[in-house]
Image (cartoon, coloured by chain):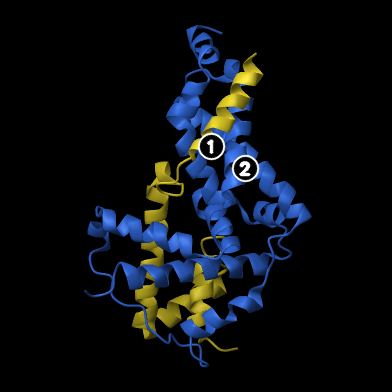
Amino acid sequence: MSLIIKCSELAQLTSESRDRALNWRERALIRIHLVLCPPCVRFRRQMAFLAGAVKSRGAERAVPGATLDASARERIRRSLESKQR
Amino acid sequence: MGELADAVTADPGRWLELHGDAMYAWALLRVRVPALAEDMVQETLLAALGAVGGFRGQSSERTWLIGILKHKVLDHLRRSGREQPLGEHLDEDTGHIAGWFDETGHWSQPPGNWAEPERVLEQEQFWAALSACLERLPERLRTLYALRELDGLETDELMDMLGISSRNNLWVMLSRARLQLRECLEVNSFSPA
């Protein structure tokens, strides 16, 4: 049983650690790999940064600058009015 | 029922005026198709009109409306996921995977050094790049990524909602979305000028 995983495997486990709890073996494999691999250390830092950044903009969880066009707005307005009557 | 309800029933167009665009942009990130996002806004406002009594003013009007919208969008995704699963064309993406790692599993382009990422958070440029990179994800990956990272849905909910057959496939798809985002940001926001 090898204690060495590839960078591609480290990347997958790093991602999965956000979706499920890794087991002790997986965590150990990550730690061993990181000792030997500066690029993967940077990768993990970047992934943590990215997750934090995406989370921090709660109010803007939308397509930026997307707006209803005039005809859709008009259609919705009419449906609201007819419901009110 | 009080003044608020009266005011709202008297002028429902005000919601559309004040919150229509925000609701539309929120829905569009999750359903992708403009006409569908428009329908979601309409359904939400109609539902809100019938449920004004449920709004107690504890949250902002917009938060309340987005809450209703979220139900509508998730319902829709659940229904369409059953009829037409999101698809797990994992093989389609192998081009990408091959691009990230060489045959031995090493980075073909090792991740660079992102200088002062904390400071970058204050720059509009960074957020524009992040949005553009999200836009560039393939549709199914973007929906999945948004529901997971923005809305915090769990693995089982996502599998059910999007018709994905195994946890492993789901996790691989999420990993592709994240790696693609990372790469896009590195190129567009952190590359040495």
Which colour denotes chain A? yellow
How crowded pointer 1 is (Cα within 10 Å; few <14, some 14-19, many 20+) is rated as few
On-image quarter of the N terminus of chain B? top right
Q: Amino acid at mark 2?
A: Val
* Residue type at the position of mark 1: Ser
Q: Is residue A13 left or right of residue B127?
A: right
Pinpoint residue A40: horizontal percent, then vertical percent. 39, 78
The image shows residue B182 at horizontal and vertical percentages of 41, 69
Numbered label attached to residue A71:
1
Residue neighbourhood size for the residue with mark 2, other residues' Cα within 10 Å, grouped as few (<14), some (14–19), many (≥20): many
| Vertical placement of residue B25 versus B180, above or below | above
Q: Which sits in the foreground, A18 or B121?
A: B121
Question: Which color has been applied to chain B in this rendered view?
Answer: blue
Front-most of B17 and A43?
B17
Horizontal side, residue B163 vs residue B137: left or right? right
Taking depth in this image into account, of B22 and B99 the one nearest to the observer is B22
Whether callout 2 and callout 1 share a subunit is answered no
In this view, the residue in front, B174 or B142, is B142
Task: For marks 2 and 1, give the one nearer the viewer.
Answer: 1
Reading the image, the residue beneath label 2 is B73
